[in-house]
Amino acid sequence: MLERYLTAASTYAHWIDYQFLLIAVLVGFWLIVAEAVMFWLIFKFRARDGRPTQYITGEESHLKRWITIPHVLVILCDIVIIVPAILVWYNIKQVMPPPDETVRVIGQQWAWSFQEAGPDGVMDTADDIRTVGELHVKVNTTYRFELMSRDVVHSFAVPAFRLKQDALPGRTISGWFRPNRVGTYDIQCTQMCGIGHALMAGRIVVETPQDHAAWLLRNSTSAVAEQQGPPASTTDALTTMAEMRR
């Protein structure tokens, strides 16, 4: 239902949407009931001439049921909320499905940095791609992320994925997501991390396999070139120019 109004771009986004919907329906129901009963009691027992005020101690058995019965019903509704909430938490935070790819997410004041494997599919090799502020991923692919912080507590949040995970200095925290919708989505920091907190934004680009492969090829080539340094011919030309200036 909520997916009609909100962008949901990961496989577990609808789990969280339905959990919020369940809470809103149950809590909203009891809100309406409580307000209706309260106003009915106000109207029914309003002040009237010639009728003395009734003193209630709260020990009358016929009045106790006004507390006991709603109390039991609210506890049952709490159980209905808690059980699926635990299941959602377990499936998202405790279970790590077999990943297809791994990305590294690094928070710092005040930017997001990303590292992912190049065409060889192996992290920490020469063709790794490092970007700032923008992460490119492939649709319908399960990603394991390694989240860390260089300075203070940050929080990596992708609202369209319903993903939110704090990043703590000195720790590497793992999580996962599986994007299922092509598009560009916001990345936010949802922990107050300093004066530039409001500017700490990024974006995640979900691409088709073909577009992502082309992006990997373009960026891995430039990354390798930067690590290897300028070509020998360029270096020789710079040396010659320096000698001429002398």
Image: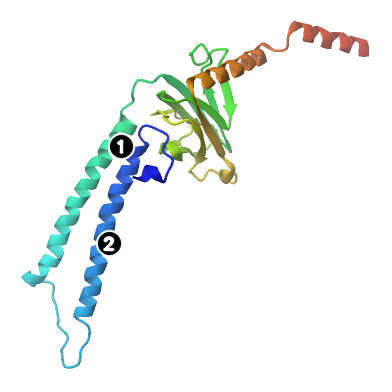
Residue 126 is situated, as x and y percent measured from the top left of the image, at 57, 12
- Depth check, front residue: 195 or 200: 200
Other-residue count near label 1 (Cα within 10 Å), few / some / many at <14 / 14–19 / ≥20 = few
> Which residue: 14% across, 56% down?
72
Secondary structure beneath dot 1 equals helix
Amino acid carrying mark 2 in the image: Leu
Write the residue at 15% across / 65% down: 67
**In this view, which residue lies farthest toward the bottom?**
50
Residue ID at (54%, 27%): 114
Which callout, 1 or 2, points to the residue nearer the camera? 2
Q: Which mark is residue 167?
A: none
Q: Quadrant of residue 220?
A: top right
Q: Residue placed at 78% from the left, 6% from the top?
A: 233
Residue 31, disc: 2
Examine the rendering and report whether any part of residue 206 can be seen: yes
Residue 235: percent from the left, percent from the top?
78, 9
Q: CA distance from mark 1 to mark 2?
A: 26 Å
Q: Relative to residue 41, is residue 130 depicted above or below?
A: above
Q: Which of the image's four quarters has the N terminus?
A: top left
Residue 89: numbered disc? 1
Residue 137 locus on image (x, y percent): 49, 25
Residue with the most extreme left position? 61
- Image position of 178 (left or right of 33): right
Task: State which tag comes first along the sequence, 1 or 2.
Answer: 2
Question: Where the C terminus falls, by quadrant?
Answer: top right
User: Residue 89 lies in what quarter of the image?
Assistant: top left
Residue extending furthest front? 4
Does residue 165 show up?
Answer: no
In the image: residue 24, left or right of residue 188: left
Residue 183 at what x, y percent from top left?
50, 33
